[in-house]
Amino acid sequence: MPHDPSTSTASPVTIPTQRAAGCPFDPPTGLAELRERDPLARMAYPDGHVGWLATGHSAVRAILADPRFSSRYELMHYPLPGGPEGPLPPAPVGDMTGMDAPEHTRFRRLLAGRFTVRRMRLLTDRVEEITAERLEAMERGGPGADLVEVFARPVPALMICELLGVPYADRERFQGHAETLMTADASPEERYAAMAGLEEYMAELVAAKRVEPADDLLGDLTRDSDLTDEELVGLGGFLLAAGLDTTANMIAHGTFALLRNPAQAEALRRDPALAPQAVEELMRYLTIAHTSIKSALEDVELEGRLIRAGESVTLSLEAANRDPERFPDPDSLDLHRKAAGHLGFGHGMHQCLGQQLARVELTVALPALLDRFPTLRLAVPADEVPLRTTMNIYGVHRLPVTWDEG
C-alpha cells in the first residue's frame, strides 16, 4: 500500500544548494544525509508548492524512464531559491528538454540518426586534429593559461560549430547568449534577451542554408526535413548552446578533479586506453548537470509513496550518482571503476542526445592534455578556482594552470 503523504507528520525538506568549502567536486552538504534518511522525500518549493525530492539512484532512474512524468516547463515548480518567480513559461520552440511526446519524439527521430555511436566515432580524427591544434597553441603561449579559455571551451565549440555548420568565427556573437541561458539565477529579462540574440543569429544562418544547403546538420535538416524556419532556428540554437557548455565544463572540471587526484591523473597518463572508462567515472563523480525537474501527469506509486498528479519532483542526479546502494565507495574518484548505470547523461527518453559526441571529445581531450603537459598543475590554490555555483551546469568559470617548459 503506497504511503499517502497527506497523512505524514514529517516536515517537507528543502533542497540543499551550499557546497562545503574545500570540496568542489562533492554535492551540496546535506544531500547524502537526506538520501540516507529518505531517498524520496516530501519537499517544500520556494513558491509554496509541496512536491518531492528524489535523491536515491533507483528512484531517480525510475522517474526519468516513466512517461507519466512530464518535462514541460509550464507544469513545473522551480526548486532552487533565487530562481524565476511564478509559473514557468513553456519551452521555446526547439528546446527539446521541455517537451513531451509526441512533440519530443518528432524532433528526436529527426536527430537520432545523426548522433549515432558509429557516426560520432567517425569524427574522432577531427576531434584529434582540433585537440592537437589547441594544445600546440597552448604550448606556444608558454606556461600559465586559463584552461577554459585556451582548451576546454574551444575544442567542443569547434566541433559543434563544424557539426551544425556554424562559422566558428561567429562564436563571440553567440557564446555569451548561450552562457546566459545556462545561468540558474539569470533574470527573466536576461534570459529573454539571450534567447532573442541566439534566435536572431540562427535565423540568419537558417535563411542562408535555405538558399544554399551545405553538407552539415543544419543543411541536412533544411533540405531533408519538414521543420519550419521557426523550428529550425529554435532547434539549432538549442543544439548550439548545449554542445558548447556541457562538454567544455566536463573538460575543465574533469581536469580540475584529475589535478586534485594526481594518482588518478597518472593512471590515465600511463594508460590512455583507460580513457573511455575514465570518462564514465568522471561523468558519475562530477555530475555537472546536477538537477532535473519532472511533474506527475497522473497519480504514480513509487517506492511505497503516492506522488499525486500535478506534483513536481526534483531529481538530484548528483546525489543519485553518489548513492552507495548503487556505487560502492561513491565519494572516491576511481578511474578503474565500472561506472555503468550512472546518470551523468540522464536516462530515458530525454537522455543526452549528444552523449556520444561528448564521449569522443572527452576520451580524446583529457589523455592528450595530460600527455602533452606532464607537469600540468594549478596556478592558484584550489580554493581560489571560481566555481559555477549558480549555473544549471556546474563546473568552473576559469581554471588557471601552469606547467614546466622543455
Image (cartoon, helix red, strand yellow):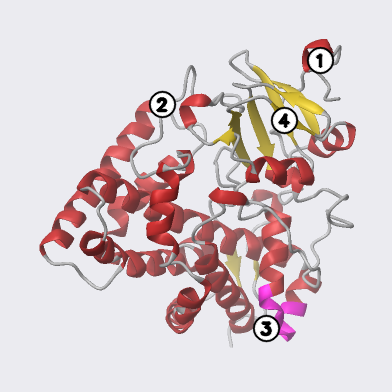
According to the picture, the residue beneath numbered tag 2 turns out to be: 89
Most distant residue in the front direction: 1
- Please name the amino acid that badge 1 sits on: Ser
Answer few, some or many: residues within 10 Å of disc 4's Cα (few below 14, many 20 plus, some between 14 and 19). Answer: many
Gap in Å between the C-alphas at discs 1 and 2?
29 Å
Dot 1 or dot 2: first in sequence order is 1
Indicate which label's residue lies in the foreground, 2 or 3: 2
Identify the residue at horizontal 61%, vertical 73% (top origin): 366
Foreground pick, 86 / 197? 86
Describe residue 386's horizontal placement relative to residue 4 as left or right: left
Pointer 1 with pointer 2, Cβ within 8 A? no
According to the picture, the residue beneath numbered tag 3 turns out to be: 272
Examine the rendered structure and indicate whether residue 74 appears above or below residue 20. above
SS at circle 1? loop
Q: Could you tell me residue 240's position as x and y percent?
A: 37, 55
Answer few, some or many: residues within 10 Å of disc 2's Cα (few below 14, many 20 plus, some between 14 and 19). Answer: few
Residue 382 included in the magenta stretch of the image: no
Q: Which residues are magenta?
A: 267-276
Pointer 4 with pointer 2, Cβ within 8 A? no
Most distant residue in the left direction: 211
SS at circle 4? strand
Foreground pick, 171 / 47? 47
According to the picture, the residue beneath numbered tag 1 turns out to be: 11
Gap in Å between the C-alphas at discs 3 and 4?
39 Å
Most distant residue in the bottom direction: 406
According to the picture, the residue beneath numbered tag 4 turns out to be: 53
Q: Could you tell me residue 99's position as x and y percent?
A: 45, 39
Q: Could you tell me residue 294's position as x and y percent?
A: 59, 33
Indicate which label's residue lies in the foreground, 1 or 3: 1
- Please name the amino acid that badge 2 sits on: Pro
Dot 3 or dot 4: first in sequence order is 4
Answer few, some or many: residues within 10 Å of disc 3's Cα (few below 14, many 20 plus, some between 14 and 19). Answer: some
